[in-house]
Amino acid sequence: MRSRSAIMARPRRLLPGGVVYHAFNRGSRKGPLFRSPEEYIAFERVLAEGREVRPMRIVAYCLMPNHWHLILWPEHDGDVSRFLHWVTGTHGRRWRRSTGTEGEGAVYQSRFSAVGVSDLQHLLTVWCYVERNPLRAGLVSRAEDWPWSSAAKCLRSDTCLALDTGPISRPSEWLAILNQQDADIGGIVDPMWVIQRRGSDPCTVRRPPLTGIVNKPTGV
């Protein structure tokens, strides 16, 4: 007879490589993850370390007070799960230790969620959504003024997190697009809500490959 833990355990999903993903997670009970510049920098350091032990291409990111967003481009099947399990586990342990709250439960509300990007247009839509988060939340008047985001990364010299080149480059007028009141890249869709499947087959874009199926955010 299987043990209770074996019955209750959630199986990991094998997310395919070669697909760009929007991954996100938030603090337990929507509690804060980052309360000072030092805590934001500490998480950037975890991402940089994680990429060394669990190889991953990080295309863009945004860290908000109680959640974060990453745009990831894994090379191999299962890379996303391996990378983010390492990142959330390591960050959770360090966060508890630094705040003197060890043994007080989970830091994150759940295991991470990931949404596959269906095509290049959708990638720009998600990219805009991720980097525009602080502006939408009223934390800054311009997206690039939020220091804990790839939109502002080029303005910071203290970051240890180097970004990887994505399947496409952002348009030259990118910051102007981010700062529009109703940012529009051929129709912005909020990927934190339900995203409808765009066809029955993954979209394949030649050199570099970008494949994926878009559906509801999936915890893995």
Image (cartoon, rainbow, N blue to C red):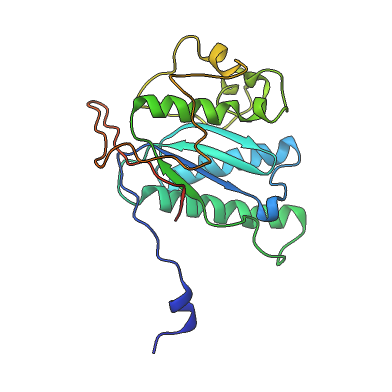
94 horizontally vs 177: left or right: right
* Count of numbered labels shown in the rendering: 0
Q: Position of residue 62 (x, y in %)?
A: 58, 33
- In the image, what residue occupies the spot 71% across and 18% down? 141
**Quadrant location of residue 209?**
top left
As rendered, which of 204 and 214 lies closer to the eye?
214
**Quadrant location of residue 42?**
top right
Q: Position of residue 153 (x, y in %)?
A: 58, 23
54 horizontally vs 41: left or right: left
- In the image, what residue occupies the spot 60% across and 51% down? 91
Q: From the image, which quarter does the C terminus lie in? A: bottom left
* 119 in relation to 22, above or below: above
* 188 in relation to 8, above or below: above
As rendered, which of 197 and 206 lies closer to the eye?
197
- In the image, what residue occupies the spot 51% across and 51% down? 112
Q: Position of residue 103 (x, y in %)?
A: 70, 67
Q: From the image, which quarter does the N terminus lie in? A: bottom left
As rendered, which of 85 and 124 lies closer to the eye?
124
Residue 60 seen from this side: yes
Residue 147 seen from this side: no
**Quadrant location of residue 122?**
top left
Q: Position of residue 12 (x, y in %)?
A: 40, 61
* 213 in relation to 85, above or below: above
